[in-house]
Image (cartoon, helix red, strand yellow):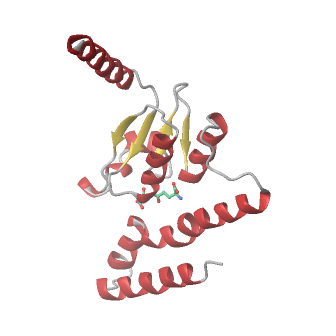
Amino acid sequence: MVRSHRRIFLSSLLAISSNLRDATVTLYSFFRSSAAYRVRIALNLKGLRYDTAGIHLQKEGGLNRKPDYQAINPQMRVPALKLDTGEILTQSLAIIDYLDETHPHPAFLPTGAFDRAKVRAIAQIIACDIHPLNNTSPLRYLKNELGQDQVKIDAWYDHDRARALLLWP
Ligand SMILES: N[C@@H](CCC(=O)N[C@@H](CS)C(=O)NCC(=O)O)C(=O)O
C-alpha cells in the first residue's frame, strides 16, 4: 500500500518536472519588476507552464539594453512573453488580456460591463499612473541627466503616488 502510494507520488513528481521541462512559453522577467510580477501572477493563476529568462535591469547598465534583448523587445523593458509559436507579446496588461482570452478559466474579470470597467480602472491606476514614475529609466534620468538628489526624487514620487491612490474612486 505504502509502496504503491510512493510510486504514484514519484511518478507525479516526474510528470511535473518533465512538464516543466517541456514548457515552450518563455517569460522575460526581472525578479524585482512589478510589471513582470503581474504576468507571473496571471500565468500561475491560469495554471500555465512557462520558462523564465532572467533579464537583470541593473547588471552591466541593464541587460535589457543589450542587442539580444532589444531583438525580443525593442522597447527594452520587461516583461515580454514568447509564445510557443515564437511570436512575442509585450506590455503586462496586454499579455494578461491575451492569457485571459486564450485561457478563459478562471476568468480574471467579473461578468457585468460596469464591474469589468471598475477592475480595469484599478489595473490602470497601477500600470499607467503609478508604475511609470517608479521606473528605472526615468528615475536614472532624474538623477544622472537632471542632477536631482535622491531625497527630492523620493519626495516627488511619493507625492504623485499618494495622489494616484487618494483619487481612487
Ligand atoms: N507598461 C509596461 C511597463 C514595463 C516596464 O516599464 N518594466 C520595467 C520594470 S518594472 C522595465 O523594464 N524597466 C527598464 C527601464 O526602465 O529601463 C508594462 O506594464 O509591461
Say which residue appears at 44% left-offset and 46% top-offset: 40
Q: Does 55 sit above or below residue 153?
A: above
Q: Is residue 77 visible?
A: no
Q: Of all residues shown, which one is farthest toward the front? A: 1
Say which residue appears at 33% left-offset and 83% top-offset: 147
Q: Is residue 89 visible?
A: yes
Residue 31 vs residue 114, the one in the foreground: 114
Instruction: Please count the marks in the image.
Output: 0
* Residue 141: quadrant of the picture: bottom left
Name the quarter where the N terminus is drawn: top left
Residue 104 vs residue 58, the one in the foreground: 104
Residue 132 vs residue 119, the one in the foreground: 119
Residue 50 in picture, x, y percent from top left = 42, 33
- Left or right of residue 85, residue 5 in this image: left
Residue 143 in picture, x, y percent from top left = 33, 78
Q: Does 7 sit above or below residue 30?
A: above
* Residue 134: quadrant of the picture: bottom left
Residue 34 in picture, x, y percent from top left = 42, 59
- Left or right of residue 20, residue 81 in this image: right
Q: Does 148 sit above or below residue 64?
A: below
Say which residue appears at 78% left-offset and 57% top-offset: 113
Residue 15 in picture, x, y percent from top left = 35, 18
Name the quarter where the C terminus is drawn: bottom right
Say which residue appears at 21% left-offset and 15% top-offset: 2
Q: Of all residues shown, which one is farthest toward the right? A: 113
Q: Does 147 sit above or below residue 129?
A: below
- Left or right of residue 6, residue 109 in this image: right
